[in-house]
Amino acid sequence: MACIVMKFGGTSVGNCELIKNVARHVKTEIDQGNKVVVVVSAMSGITDSLIDYCKQISPMPDICEYDAVIATGEQVTAGLLAIALQELNIPTRSWAGWQIPIKTDGIHGKARVESIITTELEQLMAIGYVSVVAGFQGISSDNRVTTLGRGGSDTSALAIAVAIKADRCDIYTDVDGIYTADPRIVFRARKLNKITYEEMLELASLGAKVLQTRSIEIAMKYLVRVQVLSSFVDSVGTLICNEDEIVEKELVSGVTYNRDEAKITLIGVADCPGVAASIFGPLNDANINVDMIVQNVSDDNIHADVTFTVSKSDLDFAIKVLNKKQKDLNYERLLSDSNVSKISIIGSGMRSHSGVALKMFKTLAEKSINIQVISTSEIKVSVLISEEYTELAIRALHSAYGLDI
Amino acid sequence: MACIVMKFGGTSVGNCELIKNVARHVKTEIDQGNKVVVVVSAMSGITDSLIDYCKQISPMPDICEYDAVIATGEQVTAGLLAIALQELNIPTRSWAGWQIPIKTDGIHGKARVESIITTELEQLMAIGYVSVVAGFQGISSDNRVTTLGRGGSDTSALAIAVAIKADRCDIYTDVDGIYTADPRIVFRARKLNKITYEEMLELASLGAKVLQTRSIEIAMKYLVRVQVLSSFVDSVGTLICNEDEIVEKELVSGVTYNRDEAKITLIGVADCPGVAASIFGPLNDANINVDMIVQNVSDDNIHADVTFTVSKSDLDFAIKVLNKKQKDLNYERLLSDSNVSKISIIGSGMRSHSGVALKMFKTLAEKSINIQVISTSEIKVSVLISEEYTELAIRALHSAYGLDI
């Protein structure tokens, strides 16, 4: 008998038939003698239309009220799934975030879970009840509804799994696991049976939208085994776990891409201490996230070129901010390019093997793909290339690292 | 400076533009120096579609979960109206029922308000804040969301008006007041400036859907002045108040009708003590509401005919229940007729004037309309007639009592 948190995303509960389908998944676990807590997202499309209502009324809606409005979507799903479970004669009840309560800080729109009172959840679990919890939400110390940010139901699920010491957290979604690459691009991509927390964290930060980054951090910190699987097809998913659970480590586990970034280059910036801070300070103040950064010294040794990437949606705003600061920054020219793509290889095996990055550069060179920016971490190498080479680069790398089926 | 509760129904908050319109109504009161608490319904159509979801999943959804699902509609409107008020620079916040809290009993689906903790509402009101309260809902002693039944937002509004000792409760709806008759039938109907609680209570029980019956009972008990007015047109509404506020009392204030009833006659029931109880007991056990009742003695003095009305939607079920009990009741035949209409005249002036009912019977006789059943109360006379005469009867009575414009 295991204690399992099952989390179902928006597409898995997209309509009443699908909610009944989810109830059957829960019943399967119960019939196997497991104890279950379920966490649900809003039905797909609901959160977006609630956001749209808010935006129709104000371009900048008050974030407390925004949270109060959009958190209702998950409450609806929780109630409906409870009804569906009762139809299958499973004793159950739904919980809104405030009822448990899931206590968060007061940062509306992206609150962090501080504590979860699990007394009632555990009492119900002990007598065979399935609790259905509305994901994505909590309650602040002044009794207002908070939300945990996009994909926050993953975080709800992991936080509850930690709080009730669950044996596993199953994340049901519309894909059946984590792949070595996007199967729509790489036809020979294959599903990974296991992946480490660190790799998954890199994947999520690189734009894979299967799991919210914060939820993986929680899983990693508390060593919760997470399984990503589909609510539509019956197959084994991908287990996210600690490195020592994975016997045969791949050198590289996956190749990913992100087309959502744009490149900015400042030509002829004064090459002196503090210049980086003077560039990135104003961008930070404007809430613009900067990702890859490189700095080249110019020929004259007095000036430098600084290149970095921001999200495409921030590009125009970033240029505006930098233009305003031209006098202080004293750069010659600003160049921007949004036709770029970031390609990354990820693998915890990199730590103990050299030459992994070199193989990436060679493979891209063989295909005549120019690398514009490079950034690396312990288990990841990312390069910025011209967008038109995206698919070519991914397929070449996928083959080069022996990932093809 | 007055303290006012403003309540806006579903059609008044039917979309984002209308919610902005409601915000302007609130601003008008604020600009006049009044203190305001707002109560809102769900956007029109929302509650029905939430109910539909529940019914798609189960024909008999658990009523606790049903409440948890459908109460979200009002929470959405409350948040959206708060955003709209902030756009007009009015300091505000929204409240779900559980946040205030509005404490109710545990009868889900039609809970009764037990108490309202107004400390925070009053503190905010004192510093000029407008509180926007989600109507229709409360919280039971075991922390679950309850709803107050169809039209329950009216009851929320009145209960809050009592709790904060408001000077007036304004009910904004899609009609601009209470009329002497349905203006779609009687073109010469006119809007009443004032109406007594008792009259309004009869009107509501007789099927006028402007206000939930329970809300009027609260208003009457605590003498809260209630104004019914339109959120779409700028005009004076109808004030519901105590009899002594109305100087010129009408003999009859209005003529109403209800086509939702059906008639059942049991022929040849044994005419002995306890027979009425033996008929209406089983109907009551089956949750079928019986309205008008008459009993005629038959020629033989041993048997009686009993006629009564039930709501049309209950007719088939009522017949089934009575057929099952035929042996015990020992009636000869059961007749039913759903082509009937109940016509009522209402007026608190009736108390002190005789001949009001007689005029009704005469007027109908003049038009050759046969009266099938009669029932009366202190301030009301109702008759059951053949449905096809509905409009004719209403117009004739409206003229006869001098109500035409």
Image: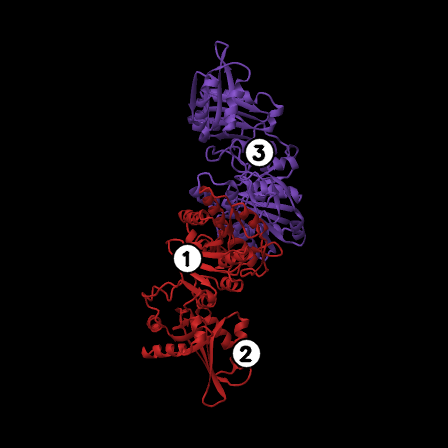
Chain colours: A purple, B red
Question: Does the image show residue B62?
Answer: no
Local packing at callout 2 (Cα closer than 10 Å; few below 14, some 14-19, many 20+) is few
Task: Give the residue pinned by disc 3.
Answer: A200
Marks 1 and 3 belong to one chain: no
Task: Give the residue pinned by disc 1.
Answer: B229
Instruction: Indicate the secondary structure of the residue bearing disc 2.
Output: helix
Cα gap from disc 3 to disc 2, whole angstroms: 72 Å
Residue A81 in the image: state x and y as whole percent.
54, 52
Question: Which chain does tag 2 point to?
Answer: B
Task: Give the residue pinned by disc 2.
Answer: B277
Q: Is residue A5 left or right of residue B189?
A: right
Local packing at callout 1 (Cα closer than 10 Å; few below 14, some 14-19, many 20+) is many
Question: Which chain does tag 1 point to?
Answer: B
Residue A49 in the image: state x and y as whole percent.
45, 45
Cα gap from disc 1 to disc 3, whole angstroms: 59 Å
Give the label, 1 or 2, closer to the camera.
1
The residue sitting at the top extreme is A300
